[in-house]
Amino acid sequence: MTLPITEDSGPAADRPPARLALTGDVARPARMTVDDLLAWPQHRVRVSFECATSGTRHHRFTGPLLHTVLSAAGPGFDPARRKDRLRFLIAVHGTDGHRVLLSWAEIDPDFGRAPVLLGVSIDGVPLDRTGPQLVLPQDRCGARHISGITGIRVDGGYPGPG
Ligand SMILES: Nc1nc2c(c(=O)[nH]1)N[C@H]1C(S)=C(S)[C@@H](COP(=O)(O)O)O[C@H]1N2
Ligand SMILES: [Mo]
C-alpha cells in the first residue's frame, strides 16, 4: 500500500506571505511583504524587555530601520525644514488590533534617533508569513514590539490646540 505523500501542512505553511500597508501622508503608498523589506540595509539587534505578564524576554531581530522605509515612501513634509517634521505621527497596527503611536521625531536622526527596526526575522526565524514586528531596542517594556504588523499610517494632520 502506498501512503500519500504528506506535505508540511502547518498553519504557517498554508498562509500566503503577509503584507503590510503603508498609507497616509506619503507620496508613494505601498503594500509590502517581508521580502520587499529585505531590499533595505539590514540591521541586527539583541533586545531584552520586561513583560508585565511573562517576565523578562530576550530576542534577536534583523530588519531595516523604520525611518529608512518610511522616508523612501516620501512623507509629506519639507525635508529641508526640520521643524516641519515635528507634527507627524506614525500609527502602527497588528493583526490582532494592537496599536502603537510613535512620533516622527522619535525615530528621526536629527531628533530622538531611536533605532527602531521593522523586524523581518525573530531569533533566526523569518517573519514572512506572520508579518514584520516593530523592534524598539530602547524600550524597557515589551508592549510596543507589535508582531504581525498589517499597517503603518503616517499622519501629518494632527490638529493642534485652538
Ligand atoms: N500584535 C501584538 N504584538 C504584541 C502584543 C500584542 O498583544 N499584540 N503584546 C506585546 C507585549 S505586551 C509584549 S511583552 C511582547 C511579548 O513578546 P514575546 O512574548 O513574544 O517575547 O509582545 C508585544 N507585541
Ligand atoms: Mo507584555
Image (spheres, rainbow, N blue to C red):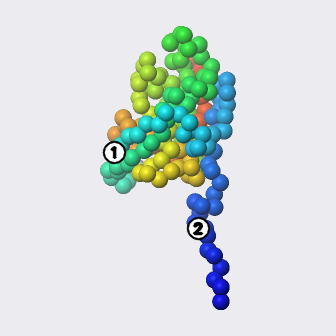
Q: From the top left corner, tell me how far across and down residue 146 is, in percent.
A: 49, 44
Residue that sits furthest to the front in the current view: 2
**Mark 1 touching mark 2, by CB under 8 A?**
no
Q: Pointer 1: what residue?
A: 48
Packing grade of label 2 (10 A; few <14, some 14-19, many >=20) is few
Quadrant where the C terminus is found in the figure: top right
Residue name at image x 57 percent, y 49 percent:
128
Q: Is residue 98 visible?
A: no
Quadrant where the N terminus is found in the figure: bottom right
Q: Is residue 102 visible?
A: yes
160 shown above or below 1: above
Amino acid type indicated by mark 1 = Ser
**Cα separation between marks 1 and 2:** 32 Å
Taking the image as shown, residue 159 lies to the left or right of residue 52, namely right
Q: From the top left corner, tell me how far across and down residue 58 is, in percent.
A: 34, 49
Question: On residue 8, which mark appears?
Answer: 2
121 shown above or below 102: below
Q: Which of the two discs, 1 and 2, labels the residue nearer the N terminus?
A: 2
